[in-house]
Amino acid sequence: MTRGVLPAGRRRLVTLGLPVLLATGCNSNQAITNPATRPARDINTLWWAMLAGALVVFAVVVALLVIAFVRRGRPGEPSHDDSGPYKVIIGGGLAAPMVVLAILFGFVIHVMPATSAPPGPTKLTVDVIGHQWFWEVRYPGTSAVTANEIHIPSGTAVDVRATTVDVIHSFWVPRLNRKIDMIPGRANRIELDAPDPGVYRGQCSEFCGVGHAQMSFYVIVQPPAQFRAWLRAQSRPAATPATAAGLLGRHTFLTVGCEDCHVIRGTSAAGRVGPDLTHVGSRRTLAALTIPNTPRTLYDWISNPQAIKPGVRMPGFASLPAAQRHALVAYLESLR
């Protein structure tokens, strides 16, 4: 678009709004420039150092180009100087980049130990298993299984073991630590040690298919006592519905095919294709943070999941009578 096409008022809005928009992104809940832990702060420092190094190299290159442009064909200048180009190549093309890269390499060597997996056993281990396209989370030693939410206690070093059952993913919570690859048949490890309670957003950073952009999750950091209470509750089997709608919803769940893909502990549902739904009503979102977990969105999801998350493997149940779909919602929302 040319300068004359964009109205003056809109140009000022873009000029003023773009820096604000960029600054907002830098301080979001999923930005390395808004670190919440010591490893994340080290990574943030390294990022700024690399940006400064890149700007130095860029400034040197631009300066050399300007000098070459200004001095080209100037009267009185030697018509041919064999040493000039070599000095530029050796100084600007070899010496300067080597100095900058050596400094950055020293930074990397300093930062790497702080972001590595814990050297020994920790108080808590969490297994994160990638699927197309959701995150399964298990707590060894308990029967608790969640999806797309990783609960950990604050002020506690947590050993996260990450793997996947199908395609390659990458586990990344920018405000807490660096990313690690998730590879079938292999468990990579990383430490999460958040000092303060809060909710931190994570994202798969390895293209894993058509649902990659919606492959997100939350790390929910709780005070230790609150975390222990949560873990005890999640370890229990599903409660029996207390309402007629809930009982009809459970009967529907166990007879129309849902039980072939999902687990609900305490019932006969034992499918392993989709997420464990034993306490799905307590989760904040559905479909890996794609939509909030409300009765309305859950009804829409059951009716036509492809309209919400294209490529998802769950079939739609729009053919079910509306009363049965509402009963399913009532049952699933009661699982807390």
Image (cartoon, rainbow, N blue to C red):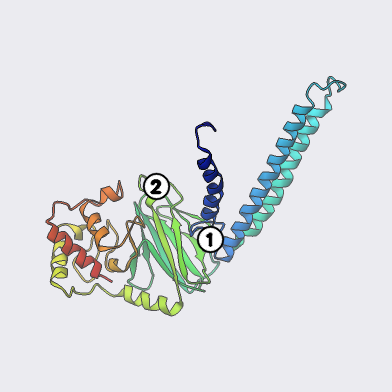
> Do the CB atoms of the residues marked 2 and 1 lie less than 8 Å apart?
no
Q: Quadrant of residue 298?
A: bottom left
Q: Alpha-carbon distance for marks 2 and 1?
A: 21 Å
Residue 65 visible? yes
Q: Position of residue 242 (x, y in %)?
A: 17, 75
**Position of 248 compared to 19: left or right?**
left
Q: What residue do we see at 80% from left, 26% from top?
A: 71
Looking at the image, is 335 positioned above or below residue 183? below
Q: Is residue 74 above or below residue 291?
A: above
Mark 1 or mark 2, which is nearer the start of the sequence? 1
Q: Position of residue 36 (x, y in %)?
A: 54, 65
Q: Which residue is more in the foreground, 47 or 146?
A: 47
Q: Which mark is residue 208?
A: 2
Task: Give the residue drawn at x 35%, y 73%.
Answer: 142
For mark 2, give the secondary structure.
loop
Q: Amino acid at mark 2?
A: Cys
Q: In the picture, residue 258 is in which quadrant?
A: bottom left
**Amino acid at circle 1:** Asn
Q: 10 Å neighbourhood of mark 1: few (<14), some, or many (≥20)?
A: many
- Under circle 1, the secondary element is loop
Left or right relative to 66: residue 260? left
| Direction from residue 89 to residue 306 in the image, left or right | left
Q: Image point 77% across, 31% down: which residue?
A: 67
Which residue corresponds to mark 1? 177
Residue 303, percent from left and from top: 20, 53
| x and y, in percent, of residue 102 in the image | 71, 48
Q: Which of the labelled discs sits on residue 290, or is there none?
A: none
Q: Residue furthest bottom?
A: 225
Instruction: Give left or right: position of 169 versus 146.
Output: right
- One can see residue 187 in this view: no
Image quadrant for the C terminus? bottom left
